[in-house]
Image: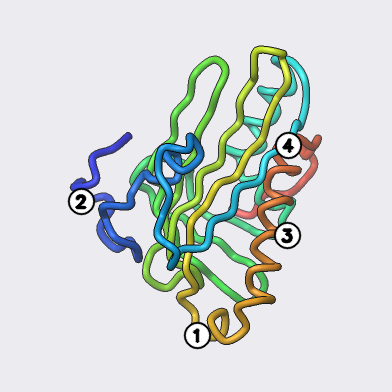
Amino acid sequence: MQDNKNSNFQGLSYPRQLVGKSLLLANAQWRPDDSWHVVDYSRTIGRGEDDFARAVDNLLSWRAHRAACVRVKGEPEPGETVQLYFGPTVSPCRIISVKRSPRRVDLIYGTMHGHIECGEEAFIIELDSDDEVIGRCVAFSQHSWWLARLFSGPARIVQRWATKRYVRGMGRDLENVVVGR
């Protein structure tokens, strides 16, 4: 993981000491205080190396996000700023980390000023010991946008819906989904 003090992480809308904590949250090594909302969703999305490779491609090409009606502009490279387009909103995020190993890929992005939420989200794809491909999304967040704060309940419902769609999108055959760049 990149160093929290790296200037690539300037402009994040959440405290620097929380950068990278979404993976610790996923590993049950950290829990945010009650002011943060936590989302943690996982499911089996395939089986074997081919399904794992497809899931990784869907995530890193942003096709998994398209499954949640989110269009992403930008590259999944550490330090890069990406723009997430959902409905009428445009939300900037900074790529915190992309880690690849033969059986696991992690992508973390953090919100920047102007995002409708404030926090961090980790996308994890793992080929487990039973050869099952597990897709997972773990996030901690607070509402930044006044409208999201005003309509907190519906905003959380939309967040849960999008989270499930991201994970499902990791495992689907999405080669024909157009990725807006």
Label number found at residue 161: 3
Q: Of 56 and 141, which appears nearest the observer?
A: 141
Q: Position of residue 65 (x, y in %)?
A: 65, 50
The Cα atoms of the two marked residues, 4 and 3, are separated by 14 Å
Q: Are marks 1 and 2 in contact (CB under 8 Å)?
A: no
- The residue that label 2 is drawn on is 7
Name the kind of residue labelled 4 in the image.
Arg
Helix, strand or loop under label 2:
helix
Q: Of 134 and 6, which appears nearest the observer?
A: 134
Front tag of 4 and 2: 4
Q: Position of residue 57 (x, y in %)?
A: 64, 32
Helix, strand or loop under label 4:
strand
Q: Residues within 10 Å of mark 4 (few under 14, many from 20)?
A: some
What's the residue at 69%, 43% (across, down)?
Answer: 167
Q: Quadrant of the N terminus?
A: top left
Q: Earlier in the sequence, mark 1 or mark 2?
A: 2
> Quick check: 91 left or right of 166?
left
Q: Earlier in the sequence, mark 2 or mark 3?
A: 2
Q: Earlier in the sequence, mark 1 or mark 4?
A: 4
- The residue that label 4 is drawn on is 43
Helix, strand or loop under label 1:
helix
